[in-house]
Amino acid sequence: MGINMEQINKGMPAGTACLYQSFAEQAVMHPNRIAVSDEHSSLTYKALKQKADLASHRLYASGVRTGNCVALILPRNCEQIIHVLAILQLGACYVPIDPDYPKERIDWIIACSQPSAIVTQRELSKTLWGNDSLTKAMSHLLFVEDQFNFVPDEHEKPVYRAAGAFAYIIFTSGSTGNPKGVVVGHQQVLALINAAMPLLDATHTDVWALFHSLAFDFSVWEVWGALTTGAKLTIIPKSVIWSPDALVQYLRAEKVTILNQTPSAFYALIDAESKALKMSEQPLCLRKVVFGGEALNLDKVKKWWQLYPCETLQLINMYGITETTVHVTWLTLSDSLCGTENSPIGEGLSSLEVLLLDENLEKVADGEIGEIYVAGDQVAFGYINRPDLTAMRFVASPFHTGKRMYRSGDLAKQIDGQLFYFGRADRQLKVRGFRIEPSEIEVVLESHAKIQRAAVIAKPCLDSGLSDGLIAILIATEESFTAQPIATLRNYLSQLLPVHYLPSDFLFVKKFPLTVNGKLDEKALLMQWQANQKSTSSLHQQRLELLRLKQQDILAKSTT
């Protein structure tokens, strides 16, 4: 059954697991420890709880009740955390929306989730909607600037619930072009925390960095990993996130001990840290770096281990999915794993069962590739207002009556209890009748001594929009290599790959574009290639025109 707005607005029965209560317990144990900081301020656990309590009074006064949704459209600062806690304290559900999203995406999320309130800043509201009264009328706007004038009514106290069933709705990209909202509850997040924290060995002395947007589910792990253990959460400024050089300095200044990264973001961080150490900077205070969100290429991590050996700083790979509450597996990495076929992702967390199944929902043999299905306490409720998609992706388990599994669309194989990631089933491309796995070509390209990174995308057919070949987007290890004939690279590939695997087009770039969530932005890569095609075509036309004029001049001279 799909999750619909009626279920949310009616309110759900209180559960026994509550994220706010887990935070409140830490506030009692560590009242004077710093709980959260941004570039302008910091709050102790005691102060954060007081501000969250006041914000919950204000939300209640505005009509927010257990089971309601509240949208958060705020910049990266402590107000985000204050209001997440305030919303959950009421048994309501937070819907994080990145202010940098396009207006159309923001409007879609608001229309889909139908929040009873939108918490934002006045200036952000003007930027997003101006005088659009229709959008504003959809929900009650609450400006954080006005909270300083709010005086709680002692006669109208909030009715605090241990927990509503739902904790948050995070919208992820959908195949239809519109994002789909994944509904996750308190019990799922706490199941993740309870399963993973003992493995991470996290304590109240740690400093976690909030690197990711609240609208990306990696943030759930960052926020609650800190606040349920009494640790400090430092919110990295937006300007620092996109500058690896600034980031390594920030990590030093804040003495961050636990950092979470997508592999694409971390590869850039390696080069920045290498430069910093050459300039005699002190080593980082990092104890753990957790990877998620993308497949990890271990060969690209070798340089990091030259800076920080495995014994001194632990790197952890955690495969995960939004629909199964951030993380599914755990693997402590070491340089001995370099050269491993595909990306090793380890074993499933104790709160989950990871199954590799074929198209008949039967388990595949050890060493065979199957689709990843996930069952257990972290599996989300489903998609908001999408019963069709919920039924398609959250399926009944043939192994346990009454249990559900999430069908991931990811491929993996298992050898001796260890899982190896083989990419998306739906990332396979069909080019001229052949099914092609782009990651296989990327691995071969990156084995070339002069290629640092490679991304292979489909070349659209101008007539039908279908794939009409492959495009290889490359970052070279040396600038001079970009001037070498492409035939040299084609010849290298032809010795290692079938002919139908060979890209028809190549483009060198200085860096890969990333999405707001730190993942490789394939749409932006395609746009770069298209822009280059137009530029090349224009230059070709100019050359043809010059040649035509020159021929006319020669012809004119020959006839005089």
Image (cartoon, rainbow, N blue to C red):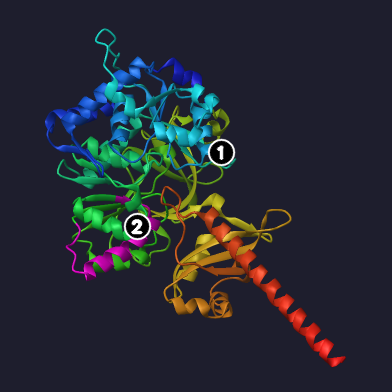
Considering only vertical position in the picture, is 417 above or below 110? below
Under mark 1, the amino acid is Asn
- Where residue 24 appears, as percent x and y from the top left, is 20, 27
Percent x, y of residue 397 = 47, 34
Total tally of numbered discs in the picture: 2
Label 2 vs 1, first from the N-terminus: 1
For residue 243, which numbered disc appears in the image?
2
Q: Which residues are magenta?
A: 260-284
**Residue 32 horizontal side relative to residue 430, left or right:** left
Pick out the residue farthest to the front: 560
Q: Give the amino acid at mark 2.
A: Ser
Residue 126 spot, x, y in % from top left = 46, 33
Magenta stretch: includes residue 102: no
* 323 lies left or right of 174: left
Report which residue position mark 1 lands on. Answer: 178
Residue lying furthest top: 155
Looking at the image, which residue is at 43% across and 48% down?
Answer: 516
Magenta stretch holds residue 277: yes
Q: Which mark is residue 36?
A: none
> Viewer-nearest of labels 2 and 1?
2
Q: Residues within 10 Å of mark 1 (few under 14, many from 20)?
A: some
Return the x and y of residue 146 as percentages of the image width and height.
33, 25
Q: Residues within 10 Å of mark 2 (few under 14, many from 20)?
A: some
